[in-house]
Image (cartoon, rainbow, N blue to C red):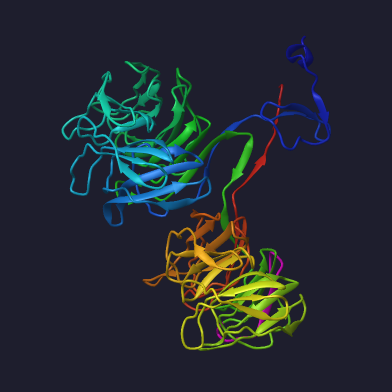
Amino acid sequence: MSDYTELKGLKVKYLAADPDPGTAGDVWYNTTTELLKAFVGRAAWSAGSLMNTARGLGGSGGAGTQTAALVMGGLTTSPSATVALTEEYNGSGWSTGEAVPVATKEAGAAGTQTAALLLGGETPAATQVVTTFEYDGTDYASGGDLPAVRRQISGAGIQTAGLAAGGYTGTAGATETFEYNGTAWTDVASLSNAHYRAAAAGTQTSGLMFSGDVSGWSQATEEYDGSSWTAGGNVNVARYFPMGGGGTSQTSALFIGGYTPPATEVASTESYDGTSWTEGPDLGTARSRGQAHGGDATSGLASGGIIGDATAQSLTEEYNVSFKVTTAGAWASGGNLTTGRWGVGNFGTQTAAVAHGGAPATALVEEYDGSSWTEVNNVPAAGRDPAGLGTLTAGLALGGGDDPKYTTATKEYDGTNWTEGGAMNTARGMCGTGGTQTAGLVFAGEGLTAAIAKTEEYNGSSWTANPNDFPSSVATHGGGTQTAAVGVAEAAVTTFEYDGSSWTAGGNTGVALSGANAGGSSQTDILRYGGSTPAPALNTATEGYDGTSWSTRPSMATGRVYIGKGNIGTTSSGLGVGGYISGASNATEEFTGETSAETASSIDFD
């Protein structure tokens, strides 16, 4: 009988532990577990961050890839409206892009996040259109019109070599195929069947059209070679209005979600190898009429969608075939504060944090070890709305007081005791902070009688006022360092970046919030969470900043306003403390960013 060496021509490595990092196809014998093991890819869906706006029917099929996706226009359901909203996905979360020039639903889409096409569709006046818009990642421009009005049309290819086929004319399904050269559309070969509410994938010379409505639910797949359509392998589950098809290759595509008879949402996922469709793992949530994006059958994204003809979704799910197991980012309950309060100051990290002061006015201080809070020495003066910065053993408590009598106080903490530091030049509360105990930054906030914009820097003993004020005179939140900070204006979407000397405009947040918190030790790694919208309505929104733009993260479990204020946490490890719900809250939530871990499979010869 042949052994592995004879078959493969290689010896099996004997290792005491699984290799790290691993490579797909690696085979070894683990001498500790006494198992023959390998890195073998597995297909799985995992949760991604929510879209800013729930919707379906936006740019049917979507554009881009799993780590650079685009959704244009679409239909919201609460209330029902056709919208012009654009959102971009960076592999972690969604951020807002420029609005489509004309609100559109049931349009086709193709291309990449920075070179996309949006074609046809229907306007809020229920008018089908021939318009094409080109998106460059920043702005929209008009492209060449389609030869005929279409909605529910399917798109594939790239911005300079696009493919559009099928769709609904207003009275019937269509068979026409159109090719785009970056300027104009040309009517070319016809489909064998009139497909609409279908999915597409591939390129202009190697395309796919599959399932959809062809005088009823269809299993048909058609393949395009740049001149004509021929029959391909049938899908396993006939459906229409799918989430879409992901893939830029005719031999590696995905078919995701949709409706089956009699109009029931399904979670089915199938992959195509150029000959046949294979059923894979289901979506976490069955839905239809959303968007799908992906480079091939090993890496996909499903966003939005509609459930029950009535409820638009903001859900995002990521599909991977990998030996790495992905765990989605999430908030989880932590240990409760011993005393509920809001307007509390914070500093430290997720596993070594300090909560000081708060309302009702208190001097109470608690330390967090990653699981529970313990009361320690009180801060010298009671008060609400202080801010904080630094670490558990080298922190600062700043300002705050008995509103409106905010103070200039700086209190230094060494992990046990509080001592008096240099007073700020301007009394304030609800301010933004950054940096460390010996290189601190404070900016904006509420003053004694009005909001202020002053920026000050701390050298470990005294504060120096910077002549360049924070550009917005309102309470604020932020994070970063003394020379590279981020500040977000209260009740606004505006963000500003500090370089140690002056403030300049940064990327806008997705939602305007009051009483939120933001923290992070780097200008390119800030987490923002909690607060309320102007309604006022408590908000669970969470966003991350990468130094250029904000994008969504998994939401908090419970919306809270006046959540713990201070420079604490990062986009991979955050902490939400206290706040106001219907009264002072003692709740703590811990945020953990998305992680992935290599997982080896045991080879069983039985």
Q: Mark yes or no: residue 262 visible.
A: yes
Residue at figure coordinates x 55%, y 85% from the top left: 360
- Rendered position, 567 above or below 219: below
Q: Tell whether 443 sits left or right of 261.
A: right
**For this view, does 580 lie left or right of residue 354?**
left
308 relative to 437 in the view: left or right: left
**In the image, is residue 204 part of the stretch drawn in magenta?**
no
Res 63 quadrant in image: top left
- 258 shown above or below 512: above
- In-front residue for pair 60/15: 60
> What percent of the width, then of the height, locates residue 486?
55, 64
Quadrant into which the C terminus falls: top right
Q: Residue at x 47, y 61 (%)?
A: 541
Q: Tell me if residue 58 comes above or below residue 391 in the rendering.
A: above
Q: Is residue 440 left or right of residue 75?
A: right
The quarter in which the N terminus is drawn is top right
Give the x, y percent position of residue 68: 48, 42
Residue 476 screen position, x and y as percent: 51, 72
Q: Residue at x 81, y 26 (%)?
A: 13
Is 368 contained in the magenta span? yes
Which residues are the magenta region?
359-373
Residue at far top of view: 1
Q: Position of residue 447 (x, y in %)?
A: 51, 84
* Furthest residue toward left: 171
